[in-house]
Image (cartoon, helix red, strand yellow):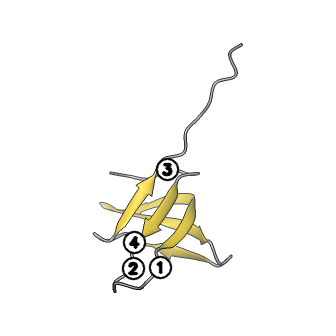
Amino acid sequence: MKGSVGDAIVVDGRHIDDLPRKGEILEVMSTASVVHYRVRWDDGTESSFFPGSDAHFVHHEVRSSKR
């Protein structure tokens, strides 16, 4: 599964009492066959992130404005 700009990314804690780390994808970057992301984390910091098996995406829903 791949993330898109605007999606949330959640990294599960490594230990039982660890809280998950959450962030918003700001940019999708790729180098050869490796996809990574620029993420703004919930603490306000930004970083390049290479997701591992402990990460998952929450896709941003686009709502239509039909009435």
Mark 2: amino acid = Gly
Q: Nearer the viewer, residue 32 or 40?
A: 40
Residue 13 x/y as whole percent:
39, 79
Q: Residues within 10 Å of mark 2 (few under 14, many from 20)?
A: few
| Quadrant containing the C terminus in the rendered view | top right
Q: Residue at the spot x=46%, y=74% of the render?
A: 20
Local SS, label 1? loop
Q: Which residue is mark 1?
A: 19
Local SS, label 3? loop
Q: Nearer the viewer, mark 3 or mark 2?
A: 2
Relative to 17, residue 22 above or below: above
In the picture, residue 43 is in which quadrant?
A: bottom right
Q: Residue at the spot x=34%, y=86% of the render?
A: 15
Q: Which badge, 2 or 4, comes first in the chain's sequence?
A: 2
Q: Is residue 34 left or right of residue 44?
A: left
Residue 50 x/y as whole percent:
39, 71
Q: Which badge, 3 or 1, comes first in the chain's sequence?
A: 3
In the picture, residue 42 is in which quadrant?
A: bottom right
Q: Which residue is mark 4?
A: 50
Q: Which residue is mark 3?
A: 4
Q: Nearer the viewer, mark 2 or mark 4?
A: 2
Q: Residue at the spot x=48%, y=62% of the render?
A: 9
Q: Is residue 42 left or right of residue 18?
A: right
Q: Which mark is residue 13?
A: 2
